Image (tube, grey):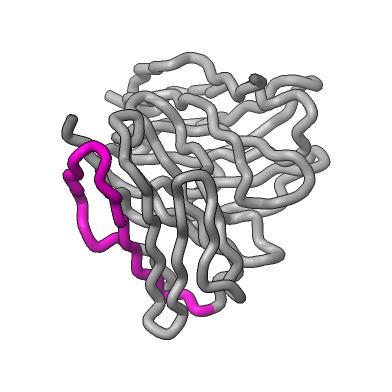
């Protein structure tokens, strides 16, 4: 069955360093991949997305990379800040479907 | 900035009781969703709602669940006869017409079934 999963449950990063959060997926039919950030006590917050026909997309301090050959997705956060501490989820969606399938989260801890 | 709100923040109920979780989506949004997150697990899609009807639902969303938009602002999730395994965080989300992934989530309601 389809699944979206993360490699590491916890990632600790020094403030100012770059963070890389990885995700593996199994559904080759996915059209969009999305990264969400969830801070303690809050709902998921959209960060960035990438279409399946792209391999890289950049946002403000964030970059998402997609490698369809190995079904791998990553989120890179530049100059990580304490406010980046949260749980990050990758997720996927297929065009024509409302359902967004979330992966298991990775907790990012930023060390001041 | 407009946001999705949910009430209550925490609901405790006994097994077999009915609960209604309430959400106020962002006012100009057209698509509404419920998700749940069992403690320590993934966020799971339950149902989507558009144009006053369910547009998609997951296998979790069985006959014990129902959704309603009783007026122009509220969106509710009802669980008819709660089970212990219904204990979870329930998130409401909404979006405008457009990018499906740009869903705005509320803060969640923690449901505890005892």
Q: Quadrant of residue B12?
A: top left
Q: Nearer the viewer, residue B33 or A58?
A: A58
Residue B97 within the magenta-colored segment of the rendering: no
Residue B73 rendering spot, x and y as whole percentages: 74, 20
Q: Nearer the viewer, residue A32 or B16?
A: A32
Residue appearing at x 45%, y 46% in the figure: A61
Q: Is residue B20 visible?
A: yes
Residue B81 rendering spot, x and y as whole percentages: 45, 31
Would you say A7 lies left or right of B12 here?
Answer: left
Q: Nearer the viewer, residue B109 or A39?
A: A39
Would you say B25 lies left or right of B91 here?
Answer: right
Would you say A108 lies left or right of A36 here?
Answer: left
Magenta-highlighted residues: A6-28
Residue B71 rendering spot, x and y as whole percentages: 79, 20
Q: Nearer the viewer, residue A62 or A69?
A: A62
Task: Report the number of discs.
Answer: 0
Residue appearing at x 52%, y 62% in the figure: A33
Q: Quadrant of the N terminus of chain B?
A: top right
Residue A20 within the magenta-colored segment of the rendering: yes
Q: Quadrant of the C terminus of chain B?
A: top left
Q: Is residue B61 visible?
A: no
Would you say B87 lies left or right of A101 here?
Answer: left
Q: Is residue A9 above or below residue A24?
A: above
Residue appearing at x 37%, y 36% in the figure: B86
Q: Is residue A90 above or below residue B76?
A: below
């Amino acid at each position: 069955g389809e699944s979206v999963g993360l490699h590491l449950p916890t990632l600790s990063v020094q403030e100012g360093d770059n963070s890389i959060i990885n995700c593996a997926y199994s559904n080759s039919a996915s059209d969009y991949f999305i990264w969400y950030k969830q801070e303690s006590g809050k709902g998921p917050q959209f960060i960035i997305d990438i279409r399946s026909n792209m391999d890289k997309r950049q946002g403000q301090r964030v970059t998402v990379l997609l490698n369809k050959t190995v079904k791998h997705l990553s989120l890179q956060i530049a100059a990580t800040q304490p406010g980046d501490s949260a749980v990050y989820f990758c997720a996927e969606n297929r065009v024509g479907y409302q359902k967004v399938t979330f992966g298991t989260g990775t907790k990012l801890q930023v060390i001041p | 900035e407009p946001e999705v709100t949910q009430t209550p923040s925490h609901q405790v109920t006994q097994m077999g009781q009915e609960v209604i979780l309430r959400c106020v989506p962002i006012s100009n949004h057209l698509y509404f969703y419920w998700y749940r997150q069992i403690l320590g697990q993934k966020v799971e899609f339950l149902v989507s709602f558009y144009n006053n009807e369910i547009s998609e639902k997951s296998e979790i969303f069985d006959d014990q669940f129902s959704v309603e938009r009783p007026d122009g602002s509220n969106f509710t999730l009802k669980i008819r006869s709660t089970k212990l395994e219904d204990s979870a965080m329930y998130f409401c989300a909404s979006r405008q017409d457009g990018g499906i992934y740009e869903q705005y989530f509320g803060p969640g309601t923690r449901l505890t079934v005892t």
